[in-house]
Image (cartoon, grey):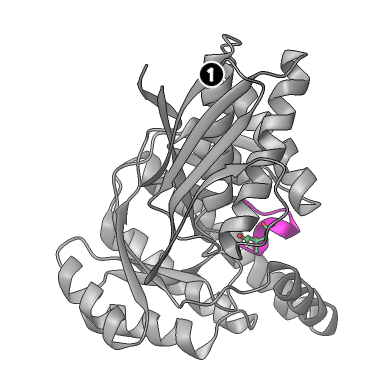
Amino acid sequence: MLVSAPGKIILFGEHSVVYGKGAIASAIDLRTYTDGKLLNEKIIKIHANDLKIPGLSISFSEEEVFLGTDYGKAGFVVSYVKSAIERIFTEYGSRKGFEISIKSDIPVGAGLGSSAAVVVPTLKLLSELLEMKLKNEEIARMGKEVEFEVQGSSSGIDPAVSALGGGLYFKKGKIERFSAPNLPLIVGYTGEKGSTKILLEKVKMLKEEYPGIVNDIMDAMGEIAEKGKKILGENGDLNELGALMNINNGLLEAIGVSTKELSELVFASRISGALGAKITGAGGGGCMYALAPNKQREVETAIKIAGGIPIRTKTTDEGVRIEHE
Ligand code: MEV
């Protein structure tokens, strides 16, 4: 059986969501595929081929779940898979042998939800193979538990987007799903991962030093997310969304989460015709995204020239799905 699940992008509201404002994330059409079958022997085999970091493709095969070998970023993904398998066995009440192959379009550690996009189809695949038939909402809940175990914390937004697809409005832990239009996006990856923990601390310190100013910035970012949600739910006006992205990016710059590399990718995208460009996720490295419906190739080239790795994608309504039995 082959199952796939999408990665995600935060469209609006990173950082301000931590201070109780709304944020909007959406599934994107970069997917992870898990292909598997039950085995008669009591053995678990994981083949994780093509877990991609742009420019680098890591391949390894015939890995057992309980392997402690360090494969760098790919090894990190295996720890999510291990936890997902244990979670399913606990729910199922016993252990079975099986074999899984994982393939992913999503760069690991770039802030595009690659970990959740491995956990979610693994949970779904095992739930189907073991005839548990878990609902996608239950898969999202279990995905959050897996992230909690591996990362020590999780808002649950990544596994929720990956399991349910579409756009998700997230506020104070509550999640509301809506159908998002297909936005043509170019993601620009700086090749570096920012530490979410360090960036959250940096913003917190700035807020303590300048509470009045930073609170106003958070309010403005919250208002942008509300406006963005309204536009996405109504006419999907790309010019308006682009304008909101640009304002949101300025505010993210103001709270100090951009880097020279991110800003260069943002400006390169705008100069080459993007309607809007902004950091996505915690910042300090990671990715930005540009909305460039008629200038896809130009923006891709500009991002490359500015030193980034362009990834063409679009928002999608589809969450986890069975590709074939
Ligand atoms: C990170 O992708 C988004 C942040 O808002 C942190 C969080 O919401 O947990 C920076």
Residue farthest along the bottom direction in this orientation: 260
Residue stretch rendered in magenta on the structure: 14-22
Indicate the position of residue 204 as horizontal and vertical percent values. Answer: 79, 73
**Relative vertical location of residue 126 with respect to residue 236 in this rendering, above or below:** above
Amino acid type at circle 1 is Leu
For the C terminus, give its image quadrant.
Answer: top left
- Residue bearing mark 1: 38
Q: Residue at x 38, y 79 (%)?
A: 266
Tell whether position 20 is magenta.
yes
Question: Image point 67% across, 22% down: which residue?
Answer: 42
Q: Secondary structure at mark 1?
A: strand
Q: In the displayed image of the protein, which residue is found farthest to the top?
A: 131
Residue 204 to residue 3: above or below: below
Quarter for ligand 1? bottom right
Q: Position of residue 17 (x, y in %)?
A: 67, 56
Whether 35 is drawn above or below 156: the answer is above
Residue 138: quarter of image: top right
Q: Residue at x 50, y 79 (%)?
A: 250
Q: Residue 177: horizontal and vertical position, in percent?
A: 51, 33
